[in-house]
Amino acid sequence: MATFTFSFFLFLSLSLFLVSAHTSPYLSPLTFSQNYQKMLTSFRIFIYTPLQPITFSTPSASIFYNFLVNSPFLTQDPNQAHLFFVPFSPDTSTRSLARLVRELRTKYPYWNRTLGADHFFISPTGIDFSSDRNVLELKKNSVQISVFPTISGNFIPHKDITLPPVNPSSLALSHAPVNEALSFLCYLKWDGKTESNLVNELRLDPEFVIESEPSDHHVGRVKSSKFCLFFYDADVAWMAEAMAAGCVPVVIVDRSVQDFPLTDVLRWSEMALLVGNRRGAEGLKAVLRGVPEYRYERMREFSVAATHHMVWSAEPQPHDAFHMVMYQLWMRRHTIRYARREDA
């Protein structure tokens, strides 16, 4: 009887997981709420004293830093800390950064316990690999928080985190009705600063709406388009705005994307399409036309549902962008102790 009861509950739990996994934008919908509440009550961060005033020109990095240093997650007792924040300005030179890590190594005991694996820092564009041992240790071991999108060589998947871009309008705060009438296949907001053969081809197709400057009908056209097109290395800052309007994002990129915001939490494969630039207009259209209606409706629903996690509020709010980045840090609190490499 005990074996039957255990098997039944195991089957029930597995069934609930499979059902919720296909009806939710979350990777782990059954555990997210519980872990999030634990993060709110338990997470503690110790901040080292900055050597100089810290400023960030990138909006999302600036907002996150200001929220962090004024948050209830901070502790003055490093022995209570799960993670340690290393503050430095984005214009810090490699030499100065190496000197900063050396000081952490010699002045405090915390870096040496994990070789910096329980430390994190903000670098809007990400830092590249360096021949300096200290900077290399920071790059390879510590959690980097950069701004999406980040150059692939400056981002280490499963370790680093990207910040959602700041929404350029308040549209992202309002969810779109699921039954909004769809008049266009795809919408693209194009700055026109660079030449693109793909964009030139799309301009000739009446199913694609391309605007260089937002018009009075901008919001309506976004909401009446099935898909919204984004070039990975161009203007992705309004992606959350498009998702909130029920416009499924399509990212033009010739490689896999591993630095999506909240990639540890959200199922981006069920919310966005990746299409290679070399496919051309006809290839892109074929991909979009080939999405089954049931999958499109699910992607649209998940995109709308996930939007509030990418909103930067005037003050931190539950489940907003700030708290979701903190949640990703919380998930990295269990660190690996790296073997020490001997100095030459």
Image (tube, rainbow, N blue to C red):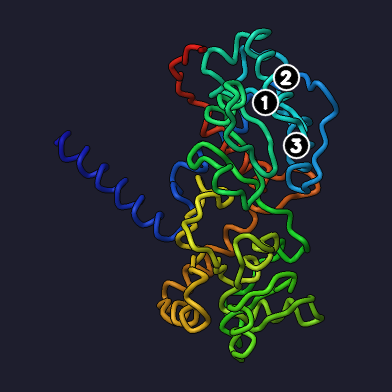
Q: Identify the disc placed on residue 90.
A: 3
Residue at 79% over, 44% down:
315
From the image, state whether disc 3 or disc 2 is nearer to you: 3
Give the quarter of the image for residue 193.
bottom right
Give the quarter of the image for residue 18.
bottom left
- Please indicate whether residue 181 sits to the left or right of residue 124 in the image: left
Count neighbours of disc 3 (C-alpha within 10 A) and say few if under 14, some if 14 to 19, many if 20 or more: some
Disc 2 secondary structure class: loop
Q: CA distance from mark 3 to mark 2?
A: 16 Å
Residue at 55% over, 44% down:
153
Kind of residue at badge 1: Phe
Q: Identify the disc placed on residue 85.
A: 1
Residue at 84% over, 24% down:
52
Residue beneath disc 2: 48
Q: Position of residue 10 (x, y in %)?
A: 26, 42
Sequence-wise first label, 2 or 1: 2
Disc 3 to disc 1: CB gap under 8 Å: no
